[in-house]
Image: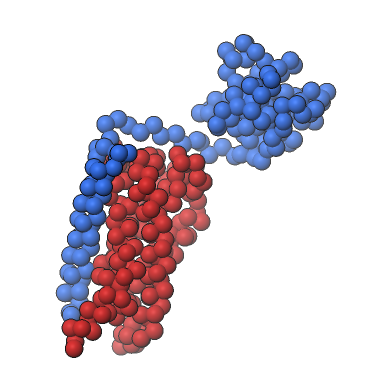
Chain colours: A red, B blue
Amino acid sequence: MTAERIMDWSGHRWLAFGARLYLAVIFGMAAAYKILHPGSFALDVATYGILPLSLINGFALVVPWVEAVVGVMLLAGFRVRAAALLVSGMMVMFMVALAVALAQGLDMSCGCFASAETGDADPIGWTTMVRDTAWLALAVYVLLADRRPLGLDGLWSARRKT
Amino acid sequence: MAGKDIILTTLRDAVLVVVVSAALALTVNGVREEGIELVASRAYEVFVPCPEPLGEVTPVAPDDPLIGAARTVLVDARGEEEYGQWHHTGSLHIGFDYLEPVPMESVKKLAGSGAAAVVVYGDGDDPDSGREMARELAGRGLRNVYYVEGGAGALKK
């Protein structure tokens, strides 16, 4: 039962709150660039050479909005588990694409926060992989440990109890 | 809530978020002027340079005395046609190809020339073929490699 006691520790909600704010800012920034420059992001997606042509634009259009919406959800503490699950899923997806590109020795823009086409340097590298792993760890922590999240979920749960 | 219920609720919420986000994305893309087509009608022109080792190079102005110095090798990185139309007096033509490495024999020729510096000029575009070739030469071991800022156009003036 030690694991259960660890997970019940009341401090998790504050640590997870910090992690949520951090991830919300990161995903908000990433989404803003991609939503503003859908064509450039589509080109970055195409450069990875993983998706078929028919799916590239749809992916480039939808993923940034998922990032934006989960960013807002993490910030507001609304459906935190679902938001953390989506962040984790996206991080795994990005890391697989990154690993494929790195294994091929491609020298290209990550497409995470900027694009080669817009002239901003955001090259891929093993540091990108380390960074993404850290963000994945934060998202998984929120998913598993934030059982009484601060924010709308917490308020809703308290209201239902009274 | 039981563990199974939590998992199901979380998955349901996640799917809902994706559906709502997709609806938002398609609506905004449909409304905005610079929206993209939902399915690309032609393949993207993806250009990923090969991971050639690149070195640090220094730009020089077109009127830099280094360009005309006795122990400097001046390299014209432009295409053969451009070189034929005009080239700087005494320049050596080694056409730069973005997709192919600089031939080893050219690199050996430069390395064995006894020159104190190699100055490359290219088309002066963005990216500049002169700068790109200079970086490649530096990455392949040549020292004191420079490129002319503005390329051939600036040199002509």
Q: Viewed as shown, does residue A158 lie left or right of A126? A: left
Query: A28 left or right of B106?
Result: left
Can see residue A159?
A: yes
Front-most of residues B157 and A135: B157
Which quarter shows the N terminus of chain B? bottom left
Indicate left or right for B110 with B18 as reference.
right
Task: Quadrant for residue B110, please give it.
Answer: top right
Asked if residue A146 is positioned above or below residue A41 in the image, the reply reads below
In the depicted structure, whether residue A71 falls above or below residue B84: below
Q: Quadrant of the C terminus of chain B?
A: top right
Identify the residue at image location x=77%, y=29%.
B64
Q: Residue at x 64, y 22 (%)?
A: B152
Residue at 38% across, 44% down:
A37
**Tag count in the figure?**
0
Res B32 quadrant in image: top left
The picture places residue B132, in percent across and down from the top left corner, at: 60, 32
The answer to whether residue A3 of the structure is visible from this angle is no
* A131 vs A64, nearest the viewer: A64
Residue A23: x and y in percent read 39, 65
Percent coordinates x, y for residue A1 in the rendering? 30, 88
Which of the 4 image quarters holds residue A52?
top left
Nearer to the camera, B156 or A131: B156
* In the foreground, B41 or B153: B153
Where's residue B84, x and y in %?
62, 11
Q: Residue furthest top?
A: B85
Residue at left 37%, top 47%? A36
